[in-house]
């Protein structure tokens, strides 16, 4: 992006170039290596390959051992063409260093250009790439450190915070944030009583109680499923194009891990390298569903996705921007993209058997493993896979800015990881399948054969010498049993084939279809007869040990590369500057609706600056200190005054004028329920919600009639629950934070959805039984169940008027009234 003599061949080129450099270069000066370094571009415009250009010579003289931006900075202060104007000044003013004939006419604009450049070069004022350090707490001291940082900014902006929300509003907020379901009137009343006596203790007790509720994992599981791009498998006619069948096991692992209080760093380690970290732990293998979900039939796209979204989800880095060139905003060269890709290059996806099931197409464990241990990664010129630089393979690594190297060590895998069909549960499932055979003689023979075959197999795996007399004796015994089993199976098969032939022959009339069936039956009967004859002949010959037929089992590599484990440990280490910051920001988003960094997937210069950088660093440091304890962070946030603040203040105030977007948290933000929460709470309030935990995905087309929580419905690009979609459900391909839209059909969905209609009918039965004919009692009960507050006088008057319409069925009126309350803004809004 720095011009040389050849760019100025014509007046038109000169004018275009001057315009380009005047407006574009000041914001891009640090990225000149994009087009002008041989390491990333062998084209002739490379500065260093123009010795006739004085500026190019200056750069070359500074030595290749120095990073390009540093050389550029040093060379910028020189005057390469000795025309009296420093190189940098010529660049900023639209000229070009190295050509004494092209001297800027006026230096008047230089200060403004230098200021613009300084702003760009100082684009990391909060230093996200430097180690996390706990900042000192601002004064005055307050019980919760979070509030110290919030209060500092409130004072700086002359804002007066609102007081604490009412106990009922606070209960509703905490219930929704921690389990995603509204409190019952009794639960609200209980909290109000405790809160009136000891507010802090009441909040702490409620927080702890709800985090022990298994529904907590469902609520926060859905949040993390957004970030980690959960998607059920997609395909056509059984061919998998995206994700994997049975990926729901990863979803259940997420929910279970959160409920168990598993540290966040351990969760991430298991997701990225569970097969290397704990190769015999089925729970850790379920975690690698994160990698299995990223499967795509197009391998190149698969690798692109895993690099992009691992970087965004855990580091807040847009590594996808450096596939084709150095990053235009962040200090990340193109080579770093391929270094991260090299970490994942060896891995593939497989489906292992699960307890009680032999057929993995019916049920199985989708998981990652390293298929090609020495898989090679090449840098693609301009990101084009057609032009790999094969003379320079890229080693696995992390972005150079972190100044870290991966300690990669191959991982030796136990036998059960290499041959999962030799697991105890698979052997048990094989024996259980034998017990289902109808023919008693065959069942007993197959059981005996299989038991002895598995016993011999186990001894072989423990090192039994196949030349030993003991092995020969056992192999001979199994070979005899296998012959007897084969004979019994052949007889059974012949009987079935003959019966099918008789049935086909007796079928009248002999249509074309019947004749075809008959021909097939004859062929099958002949094949069965031939098989039986062979089995009978085999029985007459003396058995030998070499006749023993071992099981054919699927075998995978005995060693894993260790690349992913090394990366997972580096990623989650306290020394990683971004991991804890990004995680803390995601927690903040789910409690306040917007992050301290409003672009959670981009902590770089093109993302939004943090509103409270010191607070984010303090939260990150506290997260690390706690052992990456998510529940500790929830307690900390929920106990803060900023979380417990009221959300509305009535008429407009000076705060509204000074901070209309509530950037400084003088009030609690208003938040709308997500699509899943809207649907779930319709069922929950009506007493219809099925609280069953876990299990296979449920057809999303049944979401209107199913009673299970929305987290269990099929969620993929091609199919999602309609109500969830209408209320801005997560995009399976990318959703680091939910969008919020206001659409007419959202109200229509709430009014006309079968879920709403069913909920209105069910809730009317419950409340009607309690209230009897008393409309006032019914109305207040409805408000308390649906909106978690009593009706005010105006609402009570309007509601009673509606329910007392003459000539209308009272039950239907009450159902319609409840449907209207479900459509109330206060039902779907957290205040």
Image (spheres, grey):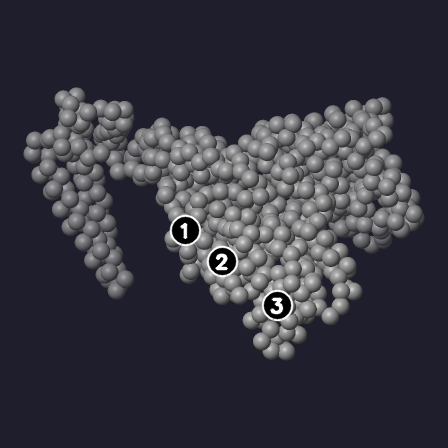
Looking at the image, residue 64 lies above or below residue 95: above
Q: Residues within 10 Å of mark 3 (few under 14, many from 20)?
A: some
- Disc 2: which residue: 38
Between discs 2 and 1, the one toward the N terminus: 2
Given this view, does label 2 or label 3 mark the residue nearer the observer?
3
Indicate left or right for 326 with 534 as reference.
Answer: right
Q: Residue 373 appears at what percent x and percent y? A: 37, 41
Q: Looking at the image, which is closer to me, 499 or 779?
A: 779
Mark 1 near mark 3, Cβ–Cβ under 8 Å? no
Cα distance between the residues tagged 2 and 3: 22 Å
Cα distance between the residues tagged 2 and 1: 14 Å
Residue found at x 87% / y 36%: 163
- Disc 3: which residue: 99
Q: What is the secondary structure assignment of the residue under circle 3?
A: loop
Indicate left or right for 641 with 723 as reference.
Answer: right
- Disc 1: which residue: 392
The image quadrant where one finds the N terminus is bottom right
Between discs 1 and 3, the one toward the N terminus: 3
Mark 2 near mark 3, Cβ–Cβ under 8 Å? no
The image quadrant where one finds the C terminus is top right
User: Is residue 588 visible from the viewing direction of this image?
Assistant: yes
Residue found at x 48% / y 33%: 284
Q: Which mark is residue 187?
A: none
Q: Residue 574 appears at what percent x and percent y? A: 60, 32
Indicate left or right for 39 with 628 as reference.
Answer: left
Mark 2 near mark 1, Cβ–Cβ under 8 Å? no
Residue found at x 29% / y 35%: 438
Looking at the image, residue 221 lies above or below residue 213: below
Q: Looking at the image, which is closer to me, 508 or 445?
A: 445
Q: Residues within 10 Å of mark 2 (few under 14, many from 20)?
A: some
């Amino acid at each position: 992006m720095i011009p040389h003599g050849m760019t100025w061949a014509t007046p038109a080129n000169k004018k275009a170039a001057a315009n380009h450099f005047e407006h574009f270069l000041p914001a891009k000066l640090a990225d000149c290596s994009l087009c002008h370094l041989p390491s990333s571009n062998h084209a002739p415009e490379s500065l260093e390959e123009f010795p006739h250009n004085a500026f190019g010579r200056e750069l070359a003289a500074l030595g290749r051992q120095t990073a390009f931006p540093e050389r550029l900075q040093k060379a910028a202060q020189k005057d390469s063409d000795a025309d009296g104007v420093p190189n940098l000044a010529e660049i900023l003013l639209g000229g070009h260093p190295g050509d004494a004939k092209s001297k800027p006419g006026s230096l008047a604009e230089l200060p403004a250009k230098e200021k613009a450049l300084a702003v760009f070069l100082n684009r990391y004022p909060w230093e996200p790439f430097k180690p996390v350090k706990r900042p000192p707490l601002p004064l005055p001291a307050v019980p919760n450190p979070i509030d110290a940082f919030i209060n500092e900014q409130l004072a700086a902006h002359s804002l007066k915070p609102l007081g604490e929300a009412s106990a009922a509003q606070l209960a509703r907020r905490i219930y929704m944030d921690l389990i995603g379901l509204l409190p019952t009137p009794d639960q609200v009343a209980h909290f109000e009583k405790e809160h009136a006596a000891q507010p802090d203790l009441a909040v702490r007790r409620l927080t702890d109680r709800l985090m022990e509720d298994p529904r907590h994992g469902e609520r926060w599981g859905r949040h993390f499923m957004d970030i980690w791009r959960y998607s059920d498998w997609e395909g056509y006619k059984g061919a998998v194009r995206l994700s994997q069948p049975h990926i729901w096991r990863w979803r259940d692992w997420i929910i279970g891990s959160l409920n168990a209080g598993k540290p966040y760093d351990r969760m991430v380690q298991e997701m990225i390298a569970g097969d290397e970290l704990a190769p015999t732990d089925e729970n850790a293998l379920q975690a690698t569903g994160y990698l299995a979900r990223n499967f795509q039939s197009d391998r190149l796209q698969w690798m692109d996705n895993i690099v992009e979204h691992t970087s965004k989800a855990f580091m807040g880095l847009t590594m996808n921007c450096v596939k084709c060139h150095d990053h235009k905003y962040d200090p990340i060269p193109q080579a770093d993209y391929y270094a991260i890709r090299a970490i994942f290059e060896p891995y593939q996806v497989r489906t292992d058997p699960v307890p009680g099931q032999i057929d993995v197409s019916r049920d199985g464990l989708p998981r990652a493993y390293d298929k090609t241990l020495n898989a090679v990664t090449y840098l693609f010129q301009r990101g084009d896979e057609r032009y790999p630089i094969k003379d320079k393979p890229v080693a696995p690594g992390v972005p150079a800015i972190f100044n870290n190297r991966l300690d990669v060590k191959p991982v030796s895998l136990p036998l059960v990881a290499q041959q999962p069909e030799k697991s105890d549960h698979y052997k048990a499932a094989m024996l259980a399948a034998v017990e289902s055979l109808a023919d008693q003689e065959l069942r007993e023979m197959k059981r005996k054969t299989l038991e002895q075959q598995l016993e011999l197999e186990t001894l072989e795996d423990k090192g039994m010498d196949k030349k030993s007399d003991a092995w020969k004796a056992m192999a001979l015994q199994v070979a005899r049993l296998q012959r007897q089993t084969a004979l019994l199976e052949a007889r059974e098969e012949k009987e079935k084939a003959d019966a099918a032939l008789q049935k086909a022959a007796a079928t009248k009339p002999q249509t074309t279809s019947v004749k075809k069936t008959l021909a097939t039956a004859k062929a099958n009967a002949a094949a069965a007869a031939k098989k039986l004859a062979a089995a009978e002949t085999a029985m007459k010959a003396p058995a030998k040990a070499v006749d023993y037929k071992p099981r054919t089992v699927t075998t995978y590599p005995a060693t894993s590369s260790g690349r992913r484990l090394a990366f997972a440990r580096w990623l989650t280490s306290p020394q990683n500057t971004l991991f804890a910051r990004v995680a803390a920001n995601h927690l903040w988003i789910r409690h306040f609706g917007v992050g301290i960094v409003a672009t959670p997937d981009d902590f770089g210069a093109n993302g939004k600056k943090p509103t409270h950088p010191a607070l984010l660093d303090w939260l990150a440091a506290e997260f690390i200190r706690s052992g990456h304890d998510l529940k500790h962070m929830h307690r900390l946030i929920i106990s803060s005054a900023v979380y417990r603040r009221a959300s509305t203040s009535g008429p407009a105030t000076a705060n509204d004028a000074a901070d209309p977007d509530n950037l400084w948290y003088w009030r609690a933000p208003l938040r709308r329920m997500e699509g899943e929460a809207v649907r779930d709470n319709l069922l929950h309030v009506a007493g219809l919600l099925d609280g069953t935990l876990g299990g296979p995905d449920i057809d999303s087309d049944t979401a209107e009639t199913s009673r299970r929580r929305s987290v269990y419905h099929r969620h993929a690009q091609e199919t999602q629950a309609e109500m969830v979609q209408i209320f801005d459900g997560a995009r399976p391909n990318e959703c680091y934070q939910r969008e919020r839209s206001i659409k007419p059909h959202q109200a229509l969905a709430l009014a006309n959805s079968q879920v709403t209609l069913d909920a209105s009918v069910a809730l009317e039965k419950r409340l009607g039984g309690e209230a009897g004919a008393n409309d006032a009692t019914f109305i207040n009960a409805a408000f308390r169940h649906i909106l978690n507050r009593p009706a005010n006088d105006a609402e009570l008057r309007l509601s009673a008027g509606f329910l007392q319409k003459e000539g209308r069925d009272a039950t239907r009126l009450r159902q319609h009234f409840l449907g209207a309350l479900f459509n109330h803004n206060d039902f779907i809004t957290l205040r």
